[in-house]
Amino acid sequence: MDISKERKNLSEARRIVVKIGTSSITDKRSRLDPGKVGKLVEETMRLRARGKEVIIVSSGAIGAGVGRINLERRPRKMPSLQAAAAVGQGVLMQVYSKYFGEYEQPVAQMLLTGEDFTKPKRYQNFKHTLATLLKWGVVPIVNENDCVEVEEIRLGDNDTLSAHVTIGSKADLLVILSDVGGLYRGYPKKGKRGDLIRTIKRVTRGVEQLASRNFRGFGGMRTKIRAAKMVTKAGIPVVIANGEEKNVLERVMSGEEIGTLFLSERRKK
Ligand code: GLU
């Protein structure tokens, strides 16, 4: 298989889901960093200018809430996390709207729960709304509806949410942006680059074990690999890359060997 061809093919993706992790838009104290949001909005708009449809799945509601209320630290208990998300989701949307507004780009807030993907009627509704937004040229900004989620129906992490959104929207590519540069063979120590895996042909048990061994508590690589497995099995490639890299989205889209590419396992239906 010609892997560089697979990379180049990414430039043909028309509909792209970009998952933005909390660490990509918050500061060291986990509070929302508007400058980082601005950078990713600018990058998204460059894809829009190339005629791409972009769906953003963004975390950061809890972080934004913590900052807005001036809490000392991120709470642990569920009701407090949910309340922080309820405050922060508005702040998050305000910041996105402000930066996208500079390009006169309309955005939409979509708050989803686990049930929106398991109950057929709700899944249909989600897909119809999303399709209409994309037809109108809107950039949907998706997050889990944290304030009403209880443990049983919770997806719990936005990697899984982004996988469902990618499959449900029949997107051509999922880009997961985080604070790590991709999947490493060894633990990436400070100042050392580690051994970044450029391409994964199939998410095997070995790959899953690599994620859980090396990345426990480090950027949640486990949920990212699980998301990559779901999406590649549905016939859609995934790239995990560092959200702070310059022009990261454009570079992924132009076929540059940045981050880790997970090849799709079959043709998309
Ligand atoms: N929905 C949560 C938030 O917006 C984040 C969940 C996650 O990052 O996986 O803060």
Image (cartoon, helix red, strand yellow):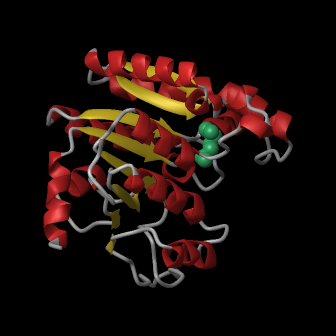
Judge from the rendering whether residue 226 lies leftward or rightward of residue 149; answer left or right. Answer: left
Q: Position of residue 66 (x, y in %)?
A: 71, 38
Q: Position of residue 218 (x, y in %)?
A: 61, 67
Q: Position of residue 78 (x, y in %)?
A: 83, 39
Q: Is residue 161 visible?
A: yes
**Up/down of 251 relative to 51, above or below:** below
Judge from the rendering whether residue 20 lies leftward or rightward of residue 38; answer left or right. Answer: right
Where does the C terminus fall, quadrant-wise? top left
Where does the N terminus fall, quadrant-wise? bottom left
Give the residue at x 22% y 39%: 47
Picture quarter with ligand 1: top right
**Up/down of 187 relative to 266, above or below:** below
User: 213 or 208: nearer the eye?
Assistant: 208
**Up/down of 5 relative to 266, above or below:** below
Give the residue at x 54% y 82%: 187
Give the residue at x 55% y 64%: 221
Q: Position of residue 165 (x, y in %)?
A: 45, 36
User: 197 or 129: nearer the eye?
Assistant: 129
Judge from the rendering whether residue 171 lies leftward or rightward of residue 128; answer left or right. Answer: left
Give the residue at x 37% y 41%: 17
Number of residue marks: 0
**Up/down of 51 relative to 23, above or below:** above
User: 232 or 248: nearer the eye?
Assistant: 232
Quadrant housing residue 148: top right
Q: Is residue 26 visible?
A: no
